[in-house]
Image (cartoon, rainbow, N blue to C red):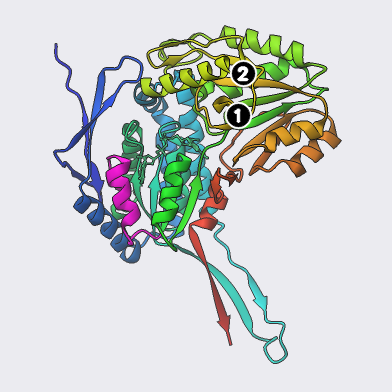
Amino acid sequence: MTTTIPDYPLLISGEKVSTGQLLPVQDKFTGELYAHVHQASKEDVSRAIQEAKRAQATVPFGIPQRYEVLMKAAQIMRSRAEELADIMVAEAGKIKREALFEVYWSADIFTESAEESRRLHGETFSLPVPGLDQKTCYTLRQPVGVVGAITPFNFPLNLVAHKVAPALAGGNAVVLKPAEKTPVIAYKLCEILLEAGLPAGYLQYLGGEGATVGEWMIADPGIDYYSFTGSVKVGKRIKEATGLRRVSLELGSNSATIVHSDADPAAAAAACSQGAFSNAGQVCISVQRIYVHETIYDRFLAELISQAELLKVGDPRQEDTGIGPMIAEKEAIRVQEWIEEAVQGGAVAHTGNKREGAHVWPTVLSNVSPEMKVVNSEVFGPVVSVTPYSTLDEAIDHVNRSDYGLQAGILTNDLQAAMQASRRIRTGGVIVGGTSAFRIGCMPYGGVKNSGIGREGPRYAIEEMTDLKTVVLL
Ligand code: NAD
């Protein structure tokens, strides 16, 4: 029996465009060919952007319609959760329960964006100047125009939702290029939006690679705003190429979590294990560095080792699997090399330190030092290091000793310690009572330093993707 491999065309104003240039998409666990995606040409990119511009300028898409479409899309996503999750299990290697969670989480972003579209308010104020105090000034929020959305592989539905839903809620048209390793789920989302009644010109789907399609997008002046999530390297390239056009860059991190002296070692270890190893550590706020108060260090480390040992590595389709494959064998090889480099430099690997194909076993390291890559660079794999500290100041200094600043966590019930850490840690967010790896859709989210520019979360992304216009009535 032969199985047909599906292929996914471009979507240009709702029209399915086959380009004849096919990129393979593998099942990340079996390695088998799962799908093909059509790669856009330079002309396709340019046409998609022009179509988006034309639609945004000429096709009405008022707030009631935006609300309806976004709510309907959320409802369709929930009703097709199993099917959507299975796509992510195949093309991203996600374990099924994490993939299902991602579908519901993404649907919520559509609901929240729909609600926020009804709150696109301006302000009214009088002018406090003699002779003008009876006059009025007010502000309007207007769409920026065309939003170019470029997304990574690790949350291939959620991170697309975080861009497309607020962009549409703000009245923009979107040109979307998802990661080439995980393009199918993004295509399905576009189909769902069209089914939900989105005017077709408001969403253009372009399959293809960053070095070609991505570069053509960032070179095209027809895009007014870039919403990017991915690596620091590509983020810098986008900033450099887009001149005065606005960007939001959600980039990497080597996030830290402090486990303070009053924390329960077992509960803290369970939270840190979850934060370090979910999605095989391929999470931008994954717990990569843990600083533990010296009085509970030994107990915490023993608990974390047991937690890591409980995780079964293997087939993401099996219910008892805790960690699936990484996105590619090449990435797993890199992560294993970084572990070995740390061990050669004196680190102790208490678990893991093992790779087979694209699978890396959850690895707990101690005795690490700041010059090791597993500490100072973004691992983006299932590796965590544990270091003792004696004073909170020392722990905060460790956390801040990083080129990144996305999010940090502190596990404590000590109010003073929590307040001090929240004020002094240089990250976009601090989670008190949890690890760095906490995000819900509605919260403002984004980084400082090399972790990026701008904030996501529907309300904040809509603010960024709309222009504040001032109207003065003299
Ligand atoms: P990546 O930077 O390699 O790719 C991201 C996207 O950029 C892909 O769609 C890719 O095709 C495109 N791209 C590549 N080169 C390009 C170019 N020259 N011009 C335009 N587009 C280009 O990232 P990845 O490997 O897919 O994802 C992992 C990275 O994403 C990690 O660094 C991770 O921390 C980061 N990330 C950040 C967040 C956050 O919210 N801060 C969330 C998830 C992932």
Q: Residue at x 57, y 57 (%)?
A: 119
**What residue sits right under mark 1 in the picture?**
371
Vertical order, 388 against 161 (above or below) = above
Ligand 1's quadrant is top left
Residue 457 percent coordinates (x, y): 55, 45
Vertical order, 262 against 148 (above or below) = above
307 relative position to 108: left or right = right
**What residue sits right under mark 2 in the picture?**
273
Specify the segment rendered in magenta: 202-224
Mark 2 against mark 1, which lies toward the viewer? 1
Q: Residue at x 58, y 26 (%)?
A: 372
| Marked residue nearer the N-terminal end (2 or 1) | 2
Residue neighbourhood size for the residue with mark 1, other residues' Cα within 10 Å, grouped as few (<14), some (14–19), many (≥20): few
**Is residue 375 or residue 19 the one in the foreground?**
375
**Is residue 275 or residue 144 the one in the foreground?**
275
Residue 20 percent coordinates (x, y): 13, 38
Vertical order, 133 against 236 (above or below) = below
**Is residue 35 or residue 106 the one in the foreground?**
35
Q: Secondary structure at mark 1?
A: loop
Q: Residue at x 22, y 40 (%)?
A: 39
Q: Secondary structure at mark 2?
A: helix
